[in-house]
Structures are given as structure tokens and as C-alpha cells.
Amino acid sequence: MSNPTLVVLTDRNDLDDQLFRHLLCVQRIASSDPEHAASRDHLQSLLQVSSGGVIFTTIQKFLPETKGGKYPVLSDRRNIVVIADEAHRSQYDFIDGFARHMRDALPNASFIGFTATPLEVGDRSTPAIFGDYIDVYDIQRAVEDGNTVRIFYEGRLAKIELKEEERPKSILTSRKSPKRKTFRPRKN
């Protein structure tokens, strides 16, 4: 991929602002200063370059003006890489959601998802959306690296005393059992 444009995508303004302010390493890998898309129109203008650059934005900028509308193609370039932070939260609605509109806007882009909680439940599958895991940084590695303290779980039973009227009623005592019908085979 020749001189890609990196689109750093978040789902919250405060996270977008934080990443834009604090990722100084971006300036070392980009040929120009990173850009912060202030609006949908600004995002569209930032994507009109032929290559290069780093753009920070939120996924909400990929929502069309009207509900049910289609988001326009912002760029059909193949050298755009979308890096989605918190990928488990907003990347699954391909009917009329952010994920669909973002892929309509950038149909040939590559997508990389970052998440601490990948999903594989029902129709929500992080690997199905983003592909195989590039790396897994689990709690064990974080402890070994000294980035977090060890987590201990202690199972306990809590003693609870309820008044008689607060106790749940048993199914057997709260419902009358239905009358059963007995069927006998007919004699011919």
C-alpha cells in the first residue's frame, strides 16, 4: 500500500479529542501534521487528497443527513486505512447503522479494529467484521508487563434474611396445577 491515509475512528468526542492531543508519535510517521475532522464537510475535504495524512474523526460523522438515506462515497481510494478504536461498540449494524454508512463512504478502505472486549455473540462478531486477530494483549501479558495489577476473584455467598412477605413464592405453591386428562385407547 503506497502512502496510505490513516483515519483514526472513535465513537466518542472526548476519546477523539484525547487521541488527537496525545498521540504525538503520529507526527513521526506522517508526512504532514495530523488533521482533526470538525464536521462531515471537513472530513470529506480531508479525504480528497490522493494519498498520505492522518485524520481523526468520530463514527457519528458517517451518519447520513436523513434517516434511511445512503451516505455518499467520500473516497474510493484503496490506500485508506480506518483504525477503529472501541471496535466492539459501533461496528455491527450493516443495515442502517454507522458501520454500513462508513463502508458506503469508503468502499475500498481497509479496516483495523481495536478493542479490549471483542464480541462473538449472535450476529455481532468482531473477527467477522475485521478479520483474524493481529495481536491479543490479554490480562496475563498486562500483568507480566507491569501495566496492571493481578486480579483476584473471591467467590462468596451473601447471607440474606428476608421477611416472609418479601420471599419469592414457590412455583409449586403459587400456581394451581392444571387438571390432567387421561386418555384410554379405544376398543374397536
Image: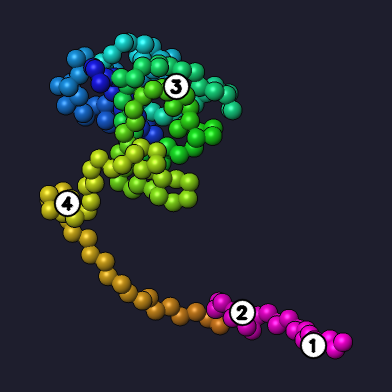
Tell me the kind of residue under disc 4. Arg
SS under mark 4? helix
Secondary element at tag 3: helix
Marks 3 and 2, how far apart in space? Answer: 55 Å
Q: Name the residue under label 3.
A: 105
**Which of pointers 1 and 2 indicates the residue nearer the eye?**
1
User: How many badges with numbers are in the image?
Assistant: 4
Who is closer to the viewer here, 18 or 179? Answer: 179
At 16% from the left and 26% from the top, the residue drawn is: 25
Is disc 1 surrounded by few (<14), some (14 to 19) or many (20+) residues within 10 Å?
A: few
On residue 113, which mark appears? Answer: none
Residue beneath label 4, please?
141
| Quadrant the C terminus occupies | bottom right
| Type of the residue with mark 3 | Ala
Q: Earlier in the sequence, mark 3 or mark 2?
A: 3
Disc 1 versus disc 2: distance between alpha carbons? 30 Å
Q: Bounds of the magenta span?
A: 165-188
* Residue at which label 2 appears: 171
Which amino acid type is marked by label 1? Answer: Arg
Residue 143 pos. (x, y %): 16, 54
First of labels 1, 2 by sequence position: 2
Say if the magenta span includes residue 128.
Answer: no
Question: How far is the residue under mark 1 from the one under mark 3?
Answer: 69 Å
| Residue placed under numbered mark 1 in the picture | 184
Tell me whether the residue at label 3 lies in contact with that at label 2, contact meaning CB atoms closer than 8 angstroms.
no
* Residue that lies at the very extreme toward the right in this rendered image: 188
- Residue 161: x %, y % from top left: 45, 80
Circle nearer the N terminus (1, 3) = 3
The residue lying at 23 percent from left, 64 percent from top is 152
